[in-house]
Amino acid sequence: MEKQIDFYFDVVSPYSYVASKLIEDVAQRSNAQLQWKPLLLGGIFKAVGTPNAPGLTPVKKPYLLKDLERLAKYYKFTLKMPADFPVRTVLAMRVLSGLTPEKIPQAAHSLFDAYWVDNLDIADPEVVASLVGQDAVEQAGMHDIKKALFQTTEEAVKRGAFGAPTFFVGDEMFFGHDRLYLLEEYLLTNL
C-alpha cells in the first residue's frame, strides 16, 4: 500500500505556513506521497459553526503573536506578522486549485512567503500574478476552478476537518503543525 498524506491548508493560516515548512521533510522521512490540498479556511469555519478565526479572539491574539515568534525562532525560519491579517485568500486559493498537483507546492511556498515573510497583499491580483503567473490568475475566475476549491473545502469538512492545517492518512486525521510528529510516527509504525 502506498502511503499518502493529504495536506489541507489555506495561505492565510499561520500554522499552515509553519506546517508548509515542515511537511515535505516528514513525507520524505516516512517515504510517503504528499498531496497539497488548497481550501478556504473561512469555508471550513462556516461549515462547522466556528464564528471567527479562533486565534483572533481578543484574549488569544497576543498569545498567537508570541507563539508564532517562538515557532519561527525554534524552527529557524522567518515569520513576520502581516499588517493586514487576516487577508482574503479566495483568489490565491483559487489560483492554487487551478494548478496541476505537481505545481501546487512551489506556488504555495511562493504565496506563503509573500504573505508571511514579505508581507505582500496576496489578495491583490497583480501580486499573485507576479508570483504564480498571469494565466493562473485569469483562470482562477473559471467556474471549474471555483468549483474545485469549493469541493476540496467540502471534502475536508466531510472527512472531519475543522481548521487548518489538517492532514489525513487514509481515514486518520491529524490537526495542526504540532501534530506532525504523531503523523510521522503513524506513517512509520502503522503502514
Image (cartoon, helix red, strand yellow):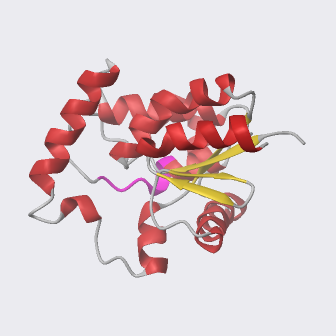
* Residue 117 percent coordinates (x, y): 30, 27
Q: Is residue 124 visible?
A: no
Which residue reaches farthest front?
189
* Vertical placement of residue 83 versus 148, above or below: above
* Residue 36 percent coordinates (x, y): 63, 42
Question: On the image, which quarter does residue 121 sit in?
Answer: top left
Q: Is residue 40 left or right of residue 152?
A: left
Which region is colored magenta?
87-92
* Residue 31 percent coordinates (x, y): 75, 27
Quarter the N terminus occupies: top right
* Vertical placement of residue 139 versus 51, above or below: above
Which residue reaches farthest bottom?
49
Residue in front for this viewpoint, 46 or 186: 186
Residue in front for this viewpoint, 135 or 161: 161
Identified at 57% across, 53% down, the residue is 94
* Residue 112 percent coordinates (x, y): 42, 35
Q: Is residue 34 left or right of residue 67?
A: right
Identified at 68% across, 32% down, the residue is 103
Question: On the image, which quarter does residue 172 sit in?
Answer: bottom right
Q: Is residue 185 visible?
A: yes
Quick check: is 88 in the magenta stretch?
yes
Which residue reaches farthest top?
76
* Vertical placement of residue 44 versus 4, above or below: below
Quarter the C terminus occupies: top right
Identified at 47% across, 45% down, the residue is 179
Residue in front for this viewpoint, 42 or 88: 42
* Vertical placement of residue 155 versus 9, above or below: below
Quick check: is 36 in the magenta stretch?
no
Q: Is residue 74 left or right of residue 56?
A: right
Q: Is residue 101 left or right of residue 42?
A: right
